[in-house]
Amino acid sequence: MAVASSTATELVHQIFDLQRVLRCIVTANIAKDADVGFALQGVMRFIGEGESRATKLASRLGVSPPVLSRHIAELEELGLVVRRPDPADGRAQLVALSETGIEKVREFEEQRSSNLRAYLAEWSEEDALEAGQVLEKLTTSLNHSVRATAAGSHHSNHTA
């Protein structure tokens, strides 16, 4: 059950169009949260899922540990993130949202949800649920494929 080349090409175009529209939306709304940019909001969302080691967060976010470390330092300076030593490994640190950070993530999510409801005013609940399911399936498939490709690049599996 393979996807046709023309279908894949059209899907790539649709994904690029979606990325462009999302960048426009982010740009239009960035002034509202000038203290915490879009990238930091994404980092906060992942940190908000539960206390974790920075190295694990970097892997989940697809960024290098030094990049994440800078983000965490910036969020810590803003009082949105707290760090503490990992009891299982004194060299490592656990990162979590502060109370202020938890509230800030709630505000971001409420604002985004409100904006999206306004943008999708013509949609039915069923349309939104279906879009969510398709996007989740696409994200899961792409994520799985990227991880499999990365794992496969460490050893060669050529067959004759």
Image (cartoon, rainbow, N blue to C red):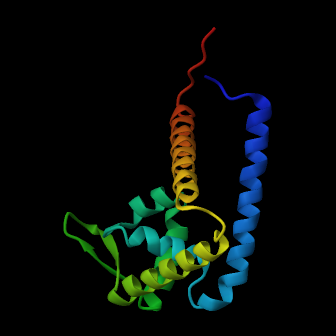
Task: Give the percent coordinates (x, y) of residue 38.
Answer: 60, 76
Q: How many marks?
A: 0
Task: Give the percent coordinates (x, y) of residue 64.
Answer: 54, 61
Task: Give the percent coordinates (x, y) of residue 111.
Answer: 54, 82
**What residue do we see at 76% from left, 64% from top?**
20
Toward the viewer: 132 or 51?
132
Toward the viewer: 41 or 1?
1
Task: Please state if 2 lies on the left or on the right of 9 as rendered.
Answer: left
Toward the viewer: 101 or 1?
1
**What residue do we see at 59% from left, 88% from top?**
33
**What residue do we see at 51% from left, 84% from top?**
74
**What residue do we see at 70% from left, 75% from top?**
25
Toward the viewer: 63 or 114?
114
**Quarter of the C terminus within the rendering:** top right
The relative height of residue 90 versus residue 154 in the rendered view (above or below) is below
Task: Give the percent coordinates (x, y) of residue 143.
Answer: 53, 45
Q: Quadrant of residue 28?
A: bottom right
The relative height of residue 50 versus residue 29 in the rendered view (above or below) is above
Residue most extreme to the top? 160
The relative height of residue 144 versus residue 100 in the rendered view (above or below) is above
**Quarter of the N terminus within the rendering:** top right
Q: Is residue 75 visible?
A: yes
Q: Is residue 40 visible?
A: no
